[in-house]
Image (tube, coloured by chain):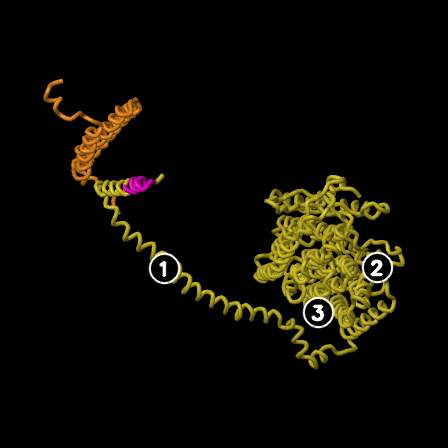
Amino acid sequence: MSPDLAPLAWTTLFAPLAAAALAGLLLRRRRALAAGVSVLGMVVGLVCTLFLLWRSLTAKEGEPTGFEAHFTWVAAGSFEARFGVLVDRLSLLMALVVTGVGTPIFVYSIGYMHGDEGYGRYFACLSLFAFSMLGIVFSTNLLQTFVFWELVGLSSYLLIGFWFGRDSAVEAGKKAFMVNRVGDFGFLCGILLLYYAVSTLPGFRDMKIPDPASPGGLDVPNALDFGHLARFYRDPALLPLLGGGTAALAAVLLFCGAIGKSAQFPLHVWLPDAMEGPTPVSALMHAATMVAAGVYMTCRVFFLFEPFPGALQVVAWIGGITAFLAATIALVQTDIKKVLAYSTLSQLGYMVMAIGLAGATAGMFHLTTHAFFKALLFLGAGSVIHACRTQEITEMGGLRKPMPSTFWTWWIGTAALIAVPGTSGFFSKDEILAAAADPVHGSGPLLALGLVTAGLTAYYMMRCTALTFHGEHRGHGHPHESPAVMTLPLWFLAVPALFVGWLGFPLLFHGHPWFQAEFNVRGVEAQAGPHEFHLPLALLGTGFAAAGGVIGWLAFGTRRIDAAAWKERLLPLHTLLARKYFLDEFYLWLVRVVQQGVAEVSNFVEQNVLIRGVIDGLSALVKASGRSLRELQTGSIHTYVRFALAGTVVVLAWVLLASARGGP
Amino acid sequence: MTPVLAALPPVTVQHYLLLSALLFAVGLVGVLFRRNILIVLMSLELMISAANLALVAFSRVHGNLQGQVMVFFSIAVAAAEAAVALSLIIALFRTRGGVSVDDAAELKG
């Protein structure tokens, strides 16, 4: 693969931006045209990505499987910021997820948003999101990643608050934006710390890095560039120059960004509220792609974590705790989108845990499979909501008959999510469990958490499915199947939801590195490990899932178990889960009491010390001196002449005295 | 040369400079203490003439023409200055009805 293909990557990146500009600026009132342009932008991106992926996978032995193209964006003294596209299998896989899941969701939106007033605005925002997300995916350096990171945050805000007439949507948008700000602050600190620590090292500045643009030439080492940093980190002679504490801290700070964007504990609170946005948005951004940006970014800079077991431990435990907590909350939710939202949190926790257990391959693999089946589930939920006009699963039921397409695709997504053997989720979840069971990097408690979470996942999905599609209809009206423009994308996503996992099955493709999170640009070969398949673990995981699923089915499908009675028996626990561990209340308390207290004290200090003391004092001094000096300005010309005369005399006397003393 | 004049001590550069200083002092006193702007202006002209006189005296002492050339420039500038000053005085007289410096003393702090 050569950099000659760079225009394709640039096209993938900028086609959605062009679509966003057209749809948002020119075609706001031309509804069909705006939607068409947006879908076209996505399709162009998908086609280019598929072509690039094909070229990368068919690269001959010894030929690079990726390339990089960039230009200088900012040059100020020794500081240089670049803007470019980094094409390797990791970025192509992620781009495939974004465009491959994005295209059916764009099409689905045509039907779902039919008749909405902000149709053009919706497609403009969606295209802007696709551009921002692809910017992160193809980013060559930390600064570019950060810029697009914030752009993704912006488009997320715009789409969560899309129905800005609803107070809850406005609140949810603000919450998402502000909670992300906490994580992004850490992210920015991490970038600055890393840049400062690395760029000041003479060992880094003297590195000999071949320039991809001119064969034989050397590139200037840039402490923001992924490729340069990776070279530095992977050089056993250079890495010890960097303080281990600083480097580990920088890695953890960068991970803070991922905690915010990928909604990990304790910054996960924004994601369930983000379900206020239109359902296709939830499917695309808050389930499949945007929330995976943190996972992707952590994989991309995995080399920063790799040498520091402490940093990896932090990542693994944050992921494990998120996976478990979110799954327990999902057990009792009654809003179909909330169930899926907490399920997303839980699965993102799995991915992050896998990365922390040195299984970046497993993390990216699960990201890919999850993107397809979770997008499918969300679109199914959207179809149900479209038909029932409610999101409460207690008011649904019996939708199996009137909505066959939605029903069957929902079951496919559910099967993949609870990891029924043979579906895509089965293979990726097995790899994560394998990473947790690894004798070197693994951890017993995390393996236990992962297994229990697998059981919980099966339970809440069975509960949700049984209440939504089986039994008798408990709501009003007669729900009917959604139009083809909505059901076709469901089937389009159902295929990869079932089969994409087989691509990572090592027995089938002989460990072909399809989903390997590798970083192999400019000769930095570092693979996070091949795919593996562990039969005992697979059986164990399936056992847990089956147990959870059977209990869920008995409680809500056949009603052999009296769920209401159990709820009464475990009421305190149920309340704790239903109130989401009181974390929202805790944050509110934090803001109302702690932050407000700090603000009051700061206000007092500002009002009394700063304003009354320093600022008022300075102005009084200026006023007083002005008042006394104005007496000199008499307006009489004689006064001025006298001053001039006195000045002349003084200067003359000084010069004469100096010359008398043998001066100049 | 008449006998009376011959009896006096010869006129040297010190005499010219003394005269110049006297003229300058007279002009300065006029500028400092007279209220009538016309007088102030005339006193200023006197101060310029004193300076011109000193320059011419130095020119004589050094035996070159530089001082005299300087004086021509000075006279030209003085003439221009007088024209501007007089027109200002006329304007002042028209607006204030007088030519005393106290008529234009509003610009004060």
Residue at 44 percent of width and 63 percent of height: A606
Quarter of image, res B5: top left
Quarter of image, res A620: bottom left
Q: Chain A in the picture: what colour?
A: yellow
Which label sits in the foreground, 1 or 2? 1
Q: CA distance from mark 1 to mark 2?
A: 71 Å
Is residue A98 visible in this depiction of the protein? yes
- Image spot of residue A48 (x, y percent): 76, 44
Q: Mark 2 vs mark 3: which is more N-terminal? A: 3
Q: Mark 1 vs mark 3: which is more N-terminal? A: 3
Q: Residues within 10 Å of mark 1 (few under 14, many from 20)?
A: few
**Residue assigned mark 2:** A531
Residue in front for this viewpoint, A425 or A22? A425
Q: Secondary structure at mark 1?
A: helix
Residue at 24 percent of width and 27 percent of height: B52
The relative height of residue A581 versus residue A387 in the rendered view (above or below) is below
